[in-house]
Amino acid sequence: MEISAIDKDKGFGVAAELAGEALPSSTVKTSSRPLVPDPTRPTFYSPHPPSPPHFLLFSLDRHVPFDPRPLLNSSRENLILNSAPVMPESSIKRSLGVDLTRTIQESRVLLVGAGGIGCELLKNLVLTGFGEIHIIDLDTIDLSNLNRQFLFRHEHIKKPKALVAKEVAHKFQPKAKLEAYHANVMDKRFNVEWFQSFNLVFNALDNLAARRHVNHMCLAAAVPLIESGTTGFNGQVQVIEKGTTECYDCNPKETPKAHPICTIRSSPTQPIHCIVWGKSYLLPELFGDSEDNPEGFDNETTADNADEIAKLKQQAQQLQEIRDSMGSEEFPHKVFDKVFRIDIEELRGMEGMWKERKAPEILDWDQLQEQSKSVEPTIVDIDQREWTEPEAFFVFKDSLDRLSKRLKELQKTASSEGPAPIIEFDKDDTDTLDFVTATAILRAAIFDIEPKSKFDTKQMAGNIIPAIATTNAMTAGLCVLQAFKVLQGDLANSKMVFLERSGARAINSDSLNPPRPDCGVCSAVHAQVLVDPEQVTLNDIVEGVLRSELGYGVELSILKESGVIYDPDLEDNLPKKLSELGIIKDSWITVVDEDDQDQDPRVNLELFINERTEPATEEVKPAVLKEIVNIPRKPKSAIQPASEDALTTNGASSTGKRKREAEDDDLTNGHLAKKVAGESTSNGNNSEPIIIEDEGAILIDD
Ligand SMILES: Nc1ncnc2c1ncn2[C@@H]1O[C@H](COP(=O)(O)OP(=O)(O)OP(=O)(O)O)[C@@H](O)[C@H]1O
Ligand SMILES: [Zn+2]
């Protein structure tokens, strides 16, 4: 990447030179000339760089009459990050124009999550002049949040994130109207009407369930949603608008990987299999509640793995007997012999398993005892390199001893009525981490698998994906840019934006796709029904609303979050009151049309339960639709190719993403990356620079 730094004083240039040293693969060019207006473009200020760079960074102070509108109006993405403590309104107007500034000031927006992205986003929203911002977060502040959730300080630890975020952000812009909720966004009180009260919703969440819930509520409320997320250096921003774009659920999401039980118990092939064995099998069997379901591997009994489960249970039972000798001198030897010798001997006996791969090797207590004599106790502090077998053996005994003493201590002080004390894995609990690292290394040696260091084990066992402050900050900036487009009703130019570390460009974008016709979530029609859940029966809904008012036939089923509550073969629930079925105010049921005899079935109907206060009378039916809705038929072929011009007005149908994937195949180093950048400059698509205004807005052109 090529970076040009220009400043009328020397300071920025020096900083850029230092940056150049820190980024040896980049070319940093510095210059200390003043900015001059570009005579060919009336509102544009050109520094006349020596050669057209890929990115151009401007650091401007208040006195330079800079107008970045041409950049904002360019067809490509720009990134705005506000870095100033307070951005004067005049600056915002100059940057965004009077109309957009007013729209922003009059907007009422919801920010869900005040974590890594949320803190950055709140700061951006406040400094950009958003008029009313509601912040919701269920969590309290933790020490580990402070490195990147910059609104929080040490004195805020244990306080609710939403409330502290509000308080701190308010100081940036006292005029902003902020409202905070220390609550779960999935609470029923945050109902469709509440969502409808916002012009725009931002998701800055960290889990699938909450993201899907907000997606669903925004679709039901017909409020646009800007969804965002980061993992390490990668970030993504997606604009979702009912009926126009794909929703969060249009594309299936990966669920966390569970390893097959046979892999964990008898045929590990990767370091993670040994780590999961130490963390989710051996540690809980010795120090936890062995009745608990282990996490990280799939121990559901099926025809295929019934034998494996039975074997595991048998081995676990034998370990339980050994557990009784915890605290005695023989305890470590007994545990070692059981898991690193007896169980392995048994496995070796299953000859069929070892035809294709090397049979596991048994470990020898006496030999390791001898070899580990010279190991220093400080070995536990060496976390960057993999321990040798004797070192791992030493830590195995040492951590087993520490954990045994801890559990004995806990047992002494525990009350007899409460649950028996246990020790669970925690990546920040050194005793458990040492134990898992050491046992995983010993197991890896048995199966001839590469060992992992304590540091790596912590990442892998703790499912840690490093959170990078810069990625969060850039992603939050991109969210605001997309918000500008949504608020201007310019969905045609809204994008799906990606931050990536590899490839030619850091920021890439893709046109938004129209909704997938087969998506059960966003193809659904949403309606509200007014009822008294204590009085109204399911039959009142099925007959009184669905069949008589909406014309459904016999073949329909009704689902609640927990499963099916009605279908033609399940009529027991019909006479029950809604409240008895757990269908309360502000919950919803999904109606699925199963009738495909005469014509195609209708799309799903999501019926939200609204409470009615006045009683039903002769004239007023017990369940009434708030508005009559038209429920279209499902399209003939569920998966249709997305219409190319459904969203794009600029004809940009060949998406940046596909192009980028092709580029990635060719690009392995910065040299090629530069070449691509140069090419796109010459074809006129990439000629705009990045601008950083260090006390107003920072614009980074994509
Ligand atoms: N259902 C929910 N309702 C409200 N807030 C939620 C909900 N689920 C998650 N959140 C909040 O979303 C935020 C996500 O932020 P982030 O991804 O930075 O996670 P974190 O928990 O702060 O950090 P880390 O997981 O890395 O320790 C968190 O503050 C979390 O409390
Ligand atoms: Zn969808």
Image (tube, grey):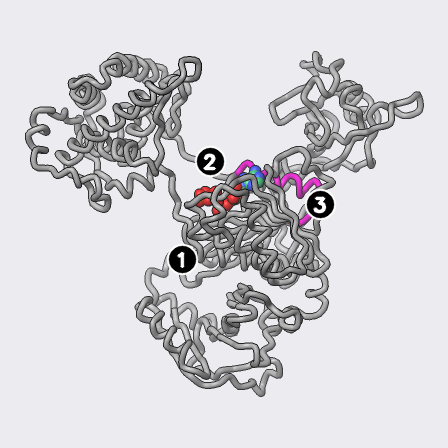
Q: Amino acid at mark 1?
A: Arg
Residue 611 left/right relative to 214: right
Q: Earlier in the sequence, mark 2 or mark 3?
A: 3
Q: Nearer the viewer, residue 585 or 663?
A: 585
- Residue 156 seen in the current view: yes
Q: CA distance from mark 2 to mark 3?
A: 27 Å
The x, y position of residue 17, in whole percent, is: 35, 75
Residue 86: say if magenta. no
Q: Residue at x 7, y 33 (%)?
A: 373
Q: Callout 1 environment at 10 Å: few (<14), some (14 to 19), or many (20+)?
A: some
The total of numbered circles placed on residues is 3
Q: Which residues are magenta?
A: 208-224
The x, y position of residue 294, in whole percent, is: 38, 24
Q: Earlier in the sequence, mark 1 or mark 2?
A: 2
Q: CA distance from mark 3 to mark 1?
A: 34 Å
Majority SS type along the magenta span: helix
Label 3 beta carbon within 8 A of ligand 2? no
Q: Earlier in the sequence, mark 3 or mark 1?
A: 3
Q: CA distance from mark 1 to mark 2?
A: 24 Å
Q: Quadrant of the N terminus?
A: bottom left
Residue bearing the label numbered 1: 501
Residue bearing the label numbered 2: 255
The x, y position of residue 165, in whole percent, is: 56, 50
Q: Amino acid at mark 3?
A: Ala
Residue bearing the label numbered 3: 222
Residue 188 left/right relative to 683: right
Q: Residue at x 56, y 77 (%)?
A: 62
Q: Secondary structure at mark 1?
A: loop
Q: Quadrant of residue 113?
A: top right
Q: Callout 3 environment at 10 Å: few (<14), some (14 to 19), or many (20+)?
A: some
Q: Secondary structure at mark 2?
A: loop
Q: Quadrant of residue 584?
A: top right
